Image (spheres, grey):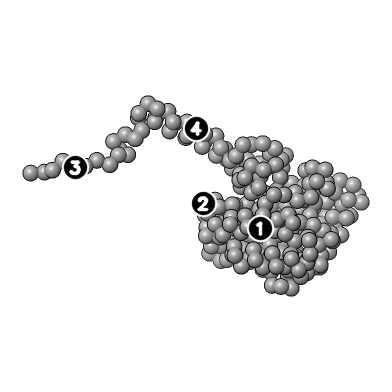
Amino acid sequence: MKKVTILTLALQKQNKIPLTMVTAYDYPTAFLVEKAGVDMVLVGDSLGMVVQGEENTLAVTVEEMIYHTKAVKKGLRRALLIVDMPFGSYKISVTEAVRNAHRVVKESGAEVVKLEGGQEIVETVQAIVQAGIPVMGHIGLRPQAINQMGGYKVQGKTREAAQKLLEDALALEKAGCCALVLEGMPDKVSEMITTQLQIPTIGIGAGVGCDGQVLVFHDLVGFGDGKCVPKFVKRYADIGNQVVEAVQNYCEEVRARQYPSADYTYTVKERED
């Protein structure tokens, strides 16, 4: 079982081997996706929505990212562990961004930090990389910028917008990013960006032309309230309904005094003469 590193990502792009990434926010999920063989695990600030029930990712804190990443770390052996730098942790100043990135890596055990943004964060990316921390970029639909974008909208739909995304991607690569997430953009745009980069691209809602794909675990397995599931999500299981059915069966058996039966009860043996 060879450990996945940032060098592995580059090698798989070179050899045209698609990369897989899934989110996780706790130990049991990390243990299971690791067992399934994913290449990368992302502790995303999406936890604000799928774990905490918030409407967006903006309220997630550095402390919460560290807490969840520490738990995920314990479930991994092979997969590369990536963590989102949350909103407000890296755009106030370059100095604060480096300080927060150091803290997250030291306290959580993450191996890569992920930042959203284009050319405006190049200086920050350079500083974090120079400080010894690998950085994954994220362009296109950026959840931390929904108030600027007017919601969760597909990006790069015009020639000018697509060109801007390409320029952002090239700038982030030059700044030292080890990989780039492309979210919510037309497949032709993501394919064009992917072919012009030396670093791998990881798509989410960006078509099949990327070097790899990522999905939110809860979306992938159908675990949660099912609200606002994006068009690009394919559900590979329906865990949510299985959980509901299991708990319903439990409640029925308890109310009927069928559980716990003798098979699930401790008893004292009678004294043998």
- Residue receiving disc 2: 28
Q: How far apart, in angstroms, are the residues tagged by discs 3 and 1?
A: 54 Å
Query: In the image, is 243 to the left or to the right of 186?
Result: left
Residue on which disc 4 sits:
245
- CA neighbours of label 3 inside 10 A, class few (<14), some (14 to 19), many (20+): few
Instruction: Estimate the x, y position of residue 157 in percent, counting from the top left.
Output: 86, 46
Secondary structure beneath dot 2 equals helix
Q: Amino acid at mark 3?
A: Lys
Query: Could you give the CA–CA distance between mark 2 and mark 1, rounded to whole angstroms?
Result: 22 Å
Question: Dot 2: within a 10 Å radius of its alpha carbon, few (fewer than 14), some, or many (20 or more) residues?
Answer: some
The answer to which of 116 and 222 lies nearer the viewer is: 116
Q: Position of residue 94 (x, y in %)?
A: 78, 67
Mark 4–mark 1 distance (CA, rounded to whole Å): 36 Å
At a point 61% along the width and 36% down the height, the residue shown is 225
Of the two numbered discs 3 and 1 on the same chain, state the one appearing first in sequence.
1
First along the sequence among labels 4 and 1:
1
